[in-house]
Amino acid sequence: MRKYIIILIILIGISANTVKADEGMWLIQALNNELQKRMETRGLEIGSEVIYSENEASLKDAVVSLDFGCTGSMISNKGLLITNHHCAYDDIFNLSTPENNLLENGYWAKNSSEEIPVKGKTIYFLRKVVDCTNEVNHVRDSLQKIKQPSGSRRVFSIIENKHKQQSGYEASCSSMWNGNKYYMYYYDTYTDIRFVGAPPVQVAAFGGDVDNWEWPQHKCDFALYRIYGDKNGRPAAYSDENIPIKPKKILKISLDGVQENDFAMIIGFPGRTDRYSSSFKVDMNERIIGPIMVESMGTKMEIIRKWMNRDSEIRKKYSNIFFGLSNVQESLAGEVACTRRFDVVEKKRQEENKYWKNDASLLSMMERGYKDVEEIEKYMTYYRQSLVSGKGFIALGNRVNSLKPDDNQSYDSFVKRVEKLFTEYDARVEKELMEYQLRLFIENVPEKYWGPFIKYLTGKFEDNYAAMTSEIFDNSVMLDPNRFKEAAKEKNNIKLFMEDPAVKLARDIKISDLRKDETQILKGKVSLYKMDGLYEKALYNKKKSAGILQYPDANFTMRLTYGNVCKMQPSDAINYNYISTTQGIIDKYNPYDYDFAYPENILNIIKRGEWGKYGKDGKLHVNFLTNNDITGGNSGSPVMNGKGELIGLAFDGNKESLASKYYYQDEMTNCVSVDIRYVLWYIDNCTDVGYLLDEIAAK
C-alpha cells in the first residue's frame, strides 16, 4: 500500500443500503465503554478484554508488526504468520537468484527444511502499554535543571533503557498529540524469521500499477512467514536448533464470507497521519511540495518502465525499486488531487475559525511563517527529488562517505557495498535518470545554491544535460564496475574515489546549505516545526475542552479501526459493489500486458469454477470493500468479523481516500481487502503444500 481531522463520533443508524463510517485509528489500550457500545451497535460481539488484555491472551497477541512497516497475523500454533505479498516483496526480491526469480515464479516450502531464513527481519509482538507521561516530563525537567540536553531522543533513550531492564521486553516510548501524552510500548521481538511461501507476483498483484488504489481489484495479496524461537519459545538469533514458536493467541479463520453491512474490525500498526495539521501546511503541500514530488517521481517511473519493458534483465533488477517508487508516487498524486477535490484547505480554515475565533495570534504567526519560507521549501523539494533521490548513481556516489583513512575494515566494507550496488543497477538506466535529475535541479534551484561541481558543468556545457551526464559517466570510476574493481585493488586509492565526478556530484550541495537560508529568513521567529507543534497541542486541548473524544495521529503504534462492509459511490453516476470475484480476473486477463498477464495454468483452474467450501452461490469472492479508517502500515492487517475471526487482509485504499493523511472524508475513505477464502482456495488448489491448511484454524 500502499497507504484525517479529529472528530466527534456521531452514533449513526445502519440502513439496509448505506453505512456511514466511524472515523478513527483508536489506541488499542484505550477502548473505553463508549467505543465498546458504538462497536456493538455496528455488530461487535466480543468484549474489549478479548481485544486487549495484559493478563490474558487477547487478539492483540495475534497481531504483529513487521519491521514497523506492515502488519501481520498469527494463524497457527506453529508460528505461521500471514501478511500481504507486497509487504514481503522486498524479501522475495532479495531471496531471488538469477536462476530462480521468486517474484515471477512464486515459492512454497514443502517442509521446514525448505523455509528460507530472512536476514535482518524483525517481528514485534505488543505485550502491554503504560502511560508514562509524568515520567517523561520529570526526566525532561531534571535534565533541564542540570543544563543537560533534554530533547525527546535523549529523554526517550533514558526511560526506554530503564523500562527495558526492568521488564525484559524491548521498550519504545511514543508521543501522542505532540507531547500531551506519552506511552511506553513493551514488545517481544523475534529475529529468526523464515519465508514459507507466496504466489507469483502476477497473481498476488494482478492488475499491477494500473489497479493500484482502484476499486474493484482482483489481487491475491498474501505471503507466509514462520517465526522461530529457542526451545522455550523465546526470541533467539537464528539457529538450526530453534523451533517454531507457539503464539499466545492465533486468529481463527471464518469461511462464512462477507455480506454488505457486516461488521469489520482491523487491528494493525498504521504509519503516519497528519490530521492535526494546519490549513497552512496542507496548502503548501497541495500547491507546491506535492506536485513537485508527483511530477518528478512520475518522470523517473517513465524512464525505468521504458527500460524494464525493453529488457527482462533490467526488469529483474529494477522491479523492487519501481514497485516502491510507483506506490509512493500514486499515493502522492491521489493526495494532491483529493485535497483539491474535497477542499481540505478550506475545511481546515473553517475549523481554525471555529476554535481560534477569539485568539488568532498563533494563526497569524503561522500564516506569515509559511509565506516567508515558501520559496526555500520549494527549492529544498527540488533538491530532494534530484541530487539525493535514487538508489543507483546517487547511492554509489554517497558510498565514499563511509571511507575512513587507514581503516582496512572500513575500506573492505566500502568495496563490498559498492560491488553489491553494481548488481542492482544498470548503467543505461542510471545515465538517463542522471540526465533528468541534473535538469530538474539546475532548472529549478537558483545558482546561489549550486556547488562548485554543478557550476563547472554548467559553465562547460551550458544547458546540454546529455553532455554533462556523459562527462560524469565517461570519467567516473565509481559508476563503472570494471574500472572500480581495478581501482579498488589499491587500498591507497581513497583520493581517487574522493575526486570521482559521481562523488563530487553527491557532495556538491547538502540540505544544510538550504536550511541556513530558511533559518535566516525566520531569524527571531518560531520555526515551522515548532509552529506545527504548538498548533497540534493547541487543537488537541481546545477539542478536549469541548468534550470531544479524540484519537492521536497514527505513529506506527497498534491501533483499532472499525466499520462495515460497504458499497461505494466514488463519483456522480458511478456505483461499485462491495465484492469482486474471479470473473474479474477472466475479464481483465491480457497475456500481452504484464500487469494483466495472469498465469495461464492458474487461470485454467479458475475457469473450471470448482470452489468447494471456499465459494458461495457459485462464485469465489476475491476482494472486498469496507469503510475502515486505515493508512500505510496497515498493509497485511487482519480484517475481523464481530466474533474476532479472520475474514480478510487489508492491502490497499481507494484513490478517493488519499487526502485522508490530512482529513477524513466520510463515505470516501475505504479499505480494500483480500478475502481469506480466496487465499485458502489458492493454497488448496494451486500449490502442493496442503500441510499448511492442516495448521490453519479455519472453522
Image (spheres, rainbow, N blue to C red):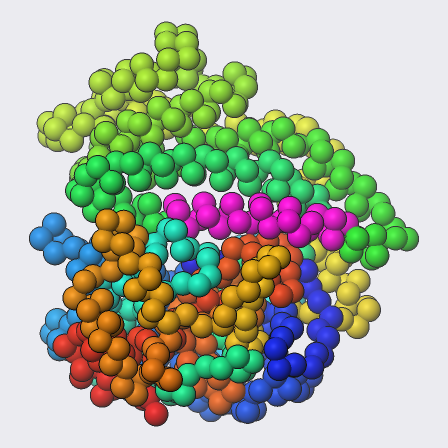
Is 627 above or below relative to 617? above
Q: Nearer the viewer, residue 405 or 210?
A: 210
Which residue corresponds to the image point at 39% horizontal and 45% vertical from the top-left? 325
Horizontal and vertical percent for residue 604?
19, 69
In the shown orientation, is residue 497 left or right of residue 208?
left
Instruction: Identify the residue at horizontal 12%, vertical 71% (top origin).
Output: 114
Q: Position of residue 144 (x, y in %)?
A: 66, 54
Q: Is residue 208 left or right of residue 384?
A: left
The stretch of residues the image draws in magenta is 325-349
Q: How many marks?
A: 0
> Does residue 446 show up magenta in the picture?
no
The outermost residue toward the right is 358
Residue at horizontal 16 percent and vertical 78 percent from the top: 689
Asked whether residue 364 is in view, the answer is yes
Residue 32, quarter of the rendered image: bottom right
Residue at 65% x, 73% y is: 20
In the shown orientation, is residue 348 left or right of residue 265? right
Asked whether 337 falls inside the magenta stretch, the response is yes
Q: On screen, 389 above or below 356?
A: above
Residue 397 or residue 163, whichever sits in front: 397
Q: Considering depth in this image, is 536 or 645 the residue closer to the camera?
A: 645
Quarter of the rendering containing residue 398: top left
Could you tell me which quadrant the C terminus lies in? bottom left
Residue 423 in the image, given as x and y percentages of width and height: 18, 41
Name the dominant secondary structure of the magenta segment. Answer: helix
